Image (cartoon, rainbow, N blue to C red):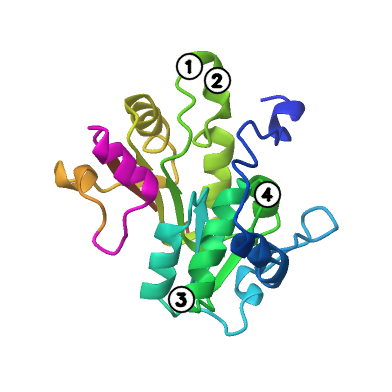
Amino acid sequence: MSENQATDHRYYGRRKGKPLKAGRERLLDTLLPKLRIAPPTAPPPESLDPRSLFAHAPREVWLEIGFGSGEHLAGQAEAHPAVGFIGAEVFLNGVASLLRHVDERSLANVRIHDNDVRPLLTHFPASSLNRISLLFPDPWPKNRHAKRRFVGPRNLDEVARLLADGGEFRVATDHPVYARWTLQHVPQHPDFEWRVQGPDDWRVRPADSTPSRYEQKAVAAGRTPMFLRFFRRNRPR
């Protein structure tokens, strides 16, 4: 991989959709500044401990990359108040939707990065996250766009660095191309294992999870979601 490829953080998706309602605009102005994560101004290795982002030190920190409209992240945060949740999403309408959930449910354990998550991750120390979720990402199904998929050697190296031993990397998709791509890359990575024992391990959403809007749309359209769970192998002692 060339140096340019290693530092290429271009983002290809949409950043804003239809105009927001006044209430959500207000939350962007008032609540988002309180929850927004500001990456360090100096380049790595200046570190940012994810636990330091929360008023009370959380038992664990879970990251959701591309939280969409925020239903899943908000449901998880409500169900696991002792866990700190970091959500990353560049789509402004999705950020506003999550803020509504946070406001209505009085969630104190959510922090938001409203930009490309990849530069931020380089500031987190090794083994500082316990779960990373990538739910229904843009599949970029054309071969010429494959390099835009989050699942790939460089990002997997970073996910492996950030996850604590036994930590979990969850990938959900309703697109067969992305499912095949994920199964071609993650199980072959030396730091991950796929503990699959039967079809229910990928057909059934994890019991501690909640459905997202994208999952519901996929099911309504007759597509079958896949839920892939990979675990960080223990580091040598």
Q: Is residue 114 visible?
A: yes
Q: Amino acid at mark 2?
A: His
The residue that appears at 26% across and 56% down in the rendered structure is 206
Going from N to C along the chain, the mark reached first, 3 or 4, is 3
Going from N to C along the chain, the mark reached first, 1 or 3, is 3
| Apparent side of residue 188 relative to residue 48 in the rendered image (left or right) | left
Distance from Cα at disc 3 to Cα at disc 4: 24 Å
Query: Which residue is the site of mark 4?
Result: 115
Query: Which residue is the site of mark 1?
Result: 142
Of tags 3 and 4, the one toward the viewer is 3
Q: Amino acid at mark 4?
A: Asn
Q: Amino acid at mark 3?
A: Arg
The residue that appears at 60% across and 74% down in the rendered structure is 51
Q: Amino acid at mark 1?
A: Lys
**Residue 105 image label:** 3
Residue 214, how many percent across, how many down?
38, 44
Distance from Cα at disc 2 to Cα at disc 3: 38 Å
| Apparent side of residue 87 relative to residue 202 in the rendered image (left or right) | right
The image quarter containing residue 180 is: top left
Depth order, front residue of 180/158: 180
Callout 1 touching callout 2 (CB < 8 Å): yes
The residue that appears at 60% across and 61% down in the rendered structure is 24
